[in-house]
Amino acid sequence: MALNMRQELRMSQQLVMTPQLQQAIKLLQLSRIELQDLVRGELLENPLLDESQELGSGGDEPVSSVEMQDSLEMNRAEANSDARVSEQQEAQSELKVDDGPKDNFDWEAYLENNAYAPSTGPGVRVDNDEMPSLEATASRPETLAEHLEWQVRLTNFSPVEEEIAEYIIQNLSSAGYLRDVTVPAIARRSGYSVMRVEEVLRRIQNLDPVSVSARNLAEALWIQVNHPDAPIEDPLVRGIVAKHLDKLERNAYPAIARDMDESLEEVYEAAKIIMTLEPRPARAYASEEPHYIVPDVYIQKIGDEYVVTLNDDGLPKLKISGFYRGAIGQSREAKEYITERLRSAQWLIRSIQQRQRTILKVAKSILKFQQEFFDKGVEFLRPLILKDVAEDIQMHESTVSRVTTNKYVHTPQGIFELKYFFNAGISRSNGEELASEAVKTKIKQLIDNEEPSRPFSDQKLVELLKQDGIDIARRTVAKYREQLGILSSSKRRRLF
């Protein structure tokens, strides 16, 4: 086969992921706190970036009713903060940064027109009165390990016992159980006998909280029943804890009564006493500190209309620093460095503006699709997919997915993540569809109103939902119930 050479001209389209485009995509999916951290880092690395100290429109001054009405009129005319930011974008696009002389660069005009001062939007005041004070957040509560180590130091533990106790304490679970390591394993690793480790373990189990470092639920309850300070002498209680916890979990009281040769009423009374015991010894130390969510968007109803505004409170207000403008004409190296930093600063400001505009567009689109939810509540949440919003705002689905990740909106119905409004549809008998979150809410309402002695089974819930026009399978009900953290009917049953 003969080989020859020839020239061909082909045309093709391809997407080139420039560093600037990668940065813009990254900014879209960042949460509010992550964006603040990124901007702080850029302020440290880029000398041409500066933070404006001017207050935005979302300051601390009260908003008058006239301003609120003006906001509504601007929302109707589509002359809101989105348009103002677009004007800033157009003003920036007219600036050309090249390698030519910069002596005639109009720094004063650029500094005046291209500061990134986020617009909270007229008509909305962001109140921080509910945020915790500095005194309430400066310290942290004592951990379980610290509390136990403090007691060990104040008790007559020998140095060897303190070493074993420290190893045990460091291997406790968040509930206060010793489950990931056994006593023989501790003995091998510490070099001491199993009997010595077991003795230290039992001493720890009688510290505060009582039964901490127990190896299972039965041991934890048994330690509490036999604690020297408040022992429970009832033999029926002791017998149930020792032999019949599995039946107690299933509410099999008649079986316990037969095995223990006691009346059903006596078993009920013993079960009430057992229910006062603590199944999670470290409950008081396992609670996480509250996480305060700051919404990215506010949707508020003014009259008969909704106003969508960005919450830019706390976001750094960026501008180009004029400190280095005198260094442009000093040397070629300085000119190249400042030009590069200027491009980076411009692109960061534009990317943040684009991020804010996109969040606002997505929020407005969600408001359009979920109008009934904002008016009436969760039960009127409609099925919605990413494609619906993407087509509405003429963007790609992946962009909508990034924008709705870790972004929150404050609404008249509460604070929700933007992803909350995207739900699969459940068919109704009248041909309409209902969002899965609305179905979960109905299931929870049915269970909340059931009789404790006769809880609804999953099949019964299916029948009740069908009466309301919701056609759903039993396994789907079971899945939604588990997602809500609700136990099965046998474990929800209360006989007293």
Image (cartoon, helix red, strand yellow):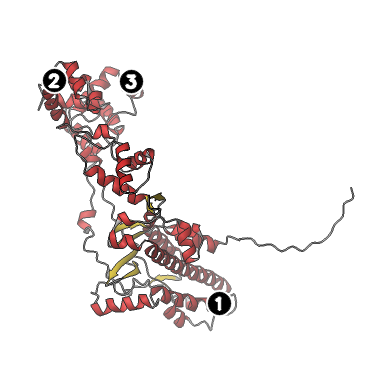
Is disc 3 placed on a helix, strand or loop? helix
Tell me if 457 is positioned left or right of 431 in this view: left
What is the CA distance from the residue labelled 1 to the residue labelled 3? 73 Å
Amino acid type, mark 2: Leu
> Could you tell me residue 114's position as x and y percent?
44, 76
The front one of 415 and 117 is: 415
For label 3, count other residues whose C-alpha is less than 10 Å away and answer few (under 14), some (14-19) or many (20+): some
What is the CA distance from the residue labelled 1 to the residue labelled 2? 86 Å
The front one of 234 and 354 is: 234
| Residue wearing tag 3 | 184
| Residue wearing tag 1 | 96
Tell me which corner region of the image, top left, top right, bottom left or bottom right, holds residue 230: top left
In the image, is residue 405 above or below residue 184?
A: below
- For residue 236, which numbered disc appears in the image? 2
Amino acid type, mark 3: Pro
Tell me if 201 is positioned left or right of 480 in this view: left
Marks 1 and 2: which is nearer the front?
2
What is the CA distance from the residue labelled 3 to the residue labelled 2? 33 Å
Considering only order in the chain, which callout, 2 or 3, is on the residue closer to the N terminus? 3
Tell me if 56 is positioned left or right of 5 in this view: left
The front one of 205 and 303 is: 303
Considering only order in the chain, which callout, 3 or 1, is on the residue closer to the N terminus? 1
Where the C terminus falls, by quadrant? top left
The front one of 52 and 289 is: 289
Q: Residue furthest right?
A: 2
> Could you tell me residue 86's position as x and y percent?
45, 75
> Could you tell me residue 240's position as x and y percent?
18, 21
Tell me which corner region of the image, top left, top right, bottom left or bottom right, holds residue 380: bottom left
Is disc 2 placed on a helix, strand or loop? helix
